[in-house]
Amino acid sequence: MTAAYAFAILGPERDRKAFSCGVAALDRYFPEQVIQDVRRRATACYVVLDTAAGRVAGYYTLAASGVPLCEMPGALARKLPRYPVVPVARLGRLAVDTAYRGRQLGGAMLWDAAARAARSGLGVFALVVDAKDDPAKAFYVHHGFATFGSAPRQLILSLANVPGER
């Protein structure tokens, strides 16, 4: 990724209609639903901006969530207090516009999400995601996530080693 991109929180002034990642649900969500979810405080949305073109190259959403301690991987569970639910940040959606594929923006957005969660000031232990399909699962595993729990595409990344303000 070069300096021609900038991360920002989504504002209502951004043109969301031109965004297309090729996945119908993600293409529909961004222009039609995300602002409502942000206003309701159900999620936060961050974008990668192509600063030269002034357009959204990608977006992701983050929300607070919880995971039952009994579903945590053993190595992680041993490091946690014995509360029934572990607080986590949930990566809800992550999409890169088709015009920006192959530029490693997905990985950059993933690590931006992890860093935001780590420095959020909230007590969150990990970043959790539900991969939509096997290629998405492979992407997250490539970036250090591990499967956990009963759902085959539910993945977790401990924030212990992610740079943040602790």
Image (cartoon, helix red, strand yellow):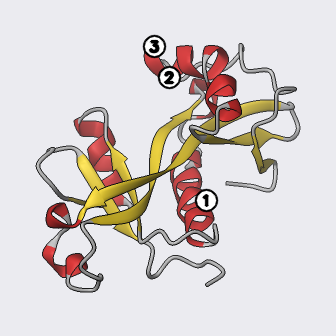
Q: CA distance from mark 3 to mark 2?
A: 6 Å
Q: Residues within 10 Å of mark 2 (few under 14, many from 20)?
A: some
- Which residue lies under the disc numbered 1? 112
Is 7 drawn above or below residue 127 in the view shown? above
Give how far across and how far down residue 18 sits, in percent: 71, 15
Q: Which mark is residue 26?
A: 2
Mark 3 or mark 1: name the one nearer the start of the chain. Answer: 3
The one nearer the camera, 76 or 95, is 76
**In the image as oriented, which residue stretches furthest toward the front?**
83
Instruction: Tell me what residue is drawn at x 86 percent, y 32 percent.
Output: 54
Mark 3, Cα crowd under 10 Å, few <14 / some 14-19 / many 20+, is few
Tell me the element at label 2. helix
Tell me the residue that label 3 is attached to.
24
Residue 155, visible in the rendered structure: yes
- Whole-angstrom CA distance, mark 3 to mark 1, is 24 Å
Instruction: Name the amino acid, label 2.
Output: Leu
Q: Is residue 145 above or below residue 151?
A: below
Work out whether residue 144 can be spotted.
no
> Mark 1, residues whose alpha carbon is within 10 Å: few (<14), some, or many (≥20)?
some
* Amino acid type assigned to the residue bearing label 1 in the image: Asp
Secondary structure under the numbered disc 3 in the rendered image: helix
9 relative to 1 in the view: left or right = right
Q: Is residue 132 left or right of residue 29?
A: left
Alpha-carbon span between mark 1 and mark 2: 19 Å
Horizontal and vertical percent position of residue 79: 27, 86
